[in-house]
Image: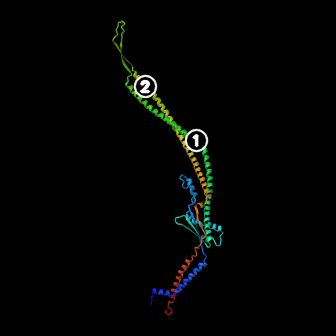
Amino acid sequence: MQMEEEISLKELIQTLWKGRYLVIGITIAAMIISGVLSFFVISPTYEASASLMASPINTNVNQNQQNANNISELLDALTTTPQMNVESYKTMIKSPEVINSVIKELNLDPKRYTLQSLTDSITLETVQNTNLILIKVKDKSPQMAADIANSLSKNFVSFVNQKVSEQASKTAQVLKQQEDVEAQRLDEAMTKLKEFLSQPRSVDELQSEVTAKITQLTDYKGRLSEAQIEEKGLVASLQSAREQLKDTPQTIKTNQAIDGGGDGSLINLNGLTINGEVANPAYSNLLDQINQLEVQLSQVRAQKAALQESIDSAQKELNQLQLELAEKQYQYDKINNDVTMAKNSYEALQQKYQETNIASSSQIGEASIIQVSSAIPPEEPVSPRKLLNIAIAAVLGLMVGVFAVFFIAYWNSEPDAEGVK
């Protein structure tokens, strides 16, 4: 037979009321133990706080230079200090190098203040929407807590300065070595350029010869064009004269009267005429004109042939000059380009080397990290929180007391071996 038991709220309250002295006793005992521990056993812990205001580090002064060439952009990328934000600073503050510097500066007991214990005693917080970093240090001594917080702030600034300076120094050494290489390269390129310019028939000379030859060729072509126009005019005039010559007779007929003279001769010839032909002067004039035109046309054509021959010769010479000029110009451009590139690289390295030297000697950490407030020895400890501990002990004691009352009531209500309660 299975029995079901129902526990009412009234029975619970009755059970608690019966064991009220036990609950009260356990609660009071817990509060007394907590009070003794908080007031007399547990050493108080103090917390000092210092605040830093951090700003990003960027030592690349030419990063936004509008006229930077590829060499400058490459050097900027190689020598730019990594961008550091607040989270980066928080990680660096707890670095072993900074912690060890604090231990050495304050001459802390290495048995009590180990690297791990001191790191655990430090709490870093950031104020929302600001660049503020709060450094909180807990210690049994209020003065020591303040000293550690202030020393941590100081050594962190020195640490940032040291790292930036070390990086800048290493970069400067590399830049100096490369600068020497580029200086030698520039000297070699300048020597080649001087040797090239000292050779006969330089680019400028060839350019002058090409210009003169083009002028001469243009003159020849202009004179040839004039001769062609003159030839056309002579051909037209000659054709016209020949047409006129066809229509002009070589001779003309004449009628001449015979005069007897009235000298008393027996025969009287008065009134008789003689018919004859004479040479036509117009025909002779046209013939002379045609001969002159043919002579002029022959001269013009001979002039044209001579001009065409001169043009062909000048064109051939011009082609040779232009080919030689192109080869010279290519060699000059190549050597001059090497000089320009070497010069740009050397100047960029020289400028970046000077900037890096400035960065290595400047106090970047102090410029980017400002200690807003120093830590002062706190007057009140942060732990133990005595009243809070007593209150928590009271709640725990009350819970333990209630559990004990119900456990005892349950134990007493268990049936014995014969099934009798």
Question: Nearest the camera: 73 or 191?
Answer: 73
Is 29 above or below relative to 46?
A: below
Q: Position of residue 369 (x, y in %)?
A: 58, 62
Question: Label 2 is placed on what type of residue?
Answer: Gln
Q: Is residue 251 left or right of residue 170?
A: left
Residue at the farthest front position: 379
Question: Label 1 is placed on what type of residue?
Answer: Ser
Q: Position of residue 355 (x, y in %)?
A: 60, 55
Which quadrant: the N terminus? Answer: bottom left
Residue at the farthest left position: 271
Question: Nearest the camera: 368 or 85?
Answer: 368
Q: Is residue 242 left or right of residue 91?
A: left
At horizontal 58% and vertical 81% (from top left) the residue drawn is 33
Secondary element under disc 2, as helix, strand or loop, is helix
At horizontal 50% and vertical 87% (from top left) the residue drawn is 17
Q: Which residue is mark 1?
A: 202
The picture quadrant where one finds residue 240 is top left
Q: Which residue is mark 2?
A: 289
Q: Position of residue 139 (x, y in %)?
A: 61, 72
Is 265 above or below relative to 361?
A: above
Question: Nearest the camera: 65 or 155?
Answer: 155
